[in-house]
Amino acid sequence: MKFWHGFSSHINPMFSSFLLYLSLPLDQHNHSSLAEFVFLGFASVGYVRGWLFVLLLLAYLFTICGNTLIFSVIRLDAALHIPMYHFVSVLSFLELWYTATTIPKMLANILSEKKTISFAGCLLQTYFFHSLGASECYLLTAMAYDRYLAICRPLQYPAIMTTTLCAKMTAACWICGFLCPISEVILVSQLPFCAYNEIQHIFCDFPPLLSLACKDTSTNILVDFATNAFIILITFLFIMFSYARIIGAVLKIKTASGRKKAFSTCASHLAVVLIFFGSIIFMYVRLKKSYSLALDRTLAVVYSVLTPMVNPIIYSLRNKELIKAIRRTILQKGDKAGLAHH
């Protein structure tokens, strides 16, 4: 609690000032009087618009149901109240908010003829999307550290990875994640945007916004590169270093069953890491505004829609304990419903 209050006492004034800044009337910012942006990301879908809406809606519903189920089962089942599953439940909770920042607006844009978003709304969508993305980077790093301790230092693991440390690491992931994009958003908010307001993307993001500014954005691109390189590359390298140590420790296990069990506990996390980081590194760690519109949109679908959707599949299908916990929860709910009916 002292850890959380110490952080929040410094962060709350900064975060409140940031939100107040975004809520100011447009003429109080140092940019043009551009009031809204128009999304062109789905302009070329044509007659497949209905199918695209259905597929995206099904993906979103599956993401919500899958991550809600994992989060609820882990919180309700006492057998899963260990650090590894604590981080998995936090990741599922994060994915619910991560997808909520973009997919509902994407669904509305597919059906709507006027695919617009206000200037402040665009900045807020960009901010929360990157805040939650950065939080996920830090959280995946914390999960890699947890697996490293469990496999490479099993005797010290219970003493090191305590409930208090788990809470502190989780809080640090969220706090650092929400602090990271503030400077980028403020810099973008002060750019002058001319008459052209059409975003060649499926949601608000830094690269498409920078391409609309009618002044030199080299400073913004440099700040974005430095921020993204620090967040993404440092966390990715730390995760890869952790798994290199883990693989080395696993290969020293004499029995094949022991090696298989150790690898199975890490395979799901590593799969999520490779899918998520593979797309965002290619998208954000670059010193140019964009590669190509088609590539940017494809990558955006991977890290904003597909990754949150496959997380429940990866964690549930490859984890026997979680599958058993889901079955126990369903059976208990069924028994309670039967007793209530009688």
Image (spheres, rainbow, N blue to C red):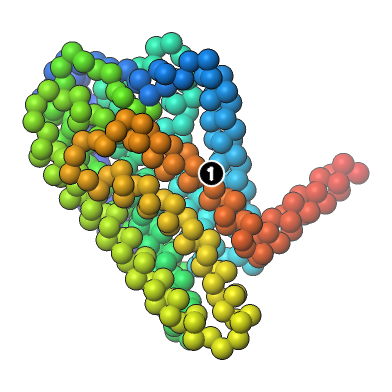
User: The C terminus appears in which quarter of the rendering?
Assistant: top right
Determine whether 288 is above or below 91 in the image: above
Q: Amino acid at mark 1?
A: Met
Taking depth in this image into account, of 181 and 74 the one nearest to the observer is 181
Outermost residue toward the right in this view: 342
- For residue 337, what is the image quadrant? top right
Farthest residue in the bottom direction?
254
Does residue 109 appear left or right of residue 323 in this picture? left
Say which residue appears at 35% left-offset and 57% top-offset. Answer: 138
The picture places residue 220, in percent across and down from the top left corner, at 14, 38
Q: Quadrant of residue 193?
A: top left
Label 1 sits on residue: 309
Q: Mark 1 packing: few (<14 Cα in 10 Å), some, or many (20+)?
A: many
Instruction: Give above or below for 17 relative to 330.
Output: above
Q: Residue at x 22, y 45 (%)?
A: 286
Residue 164 in the image: above or below residue 171: below
Secondary structure under the numbered disc 1 in the rendered image: helix
Residue 136 as seen in the image, left or right of residue 33: right
Q: Is residue 118 visible?
A: no
Name the residue at 21% across, 15% down.
Answer: 196
Residue at 53 percent of width and 51 percent of height: 311
Q: Is residue 284 left or right of residue 86?
A: left
Q: How many marks?
A: 1
65 lies above or below 124: below
Relative image position of residue 259 (x, y in whole percent): 56, 79
Q: Nearer the viewer, residue 282 or 270?
A: 282
- Residue 263, position as x, y percentages in the image: 54, 72
**Is residue 320 at all visible to an observer of this figure?**
yes
Residue 45 x, y percent position in the rendering: 46, 20
Nearest the eye: 217 or 27: 217
Instruction: Determine the residue located farthest toward the top in the rendered image.
Output: 113
Q: Quadrant of the N terminus?
A: bottom left
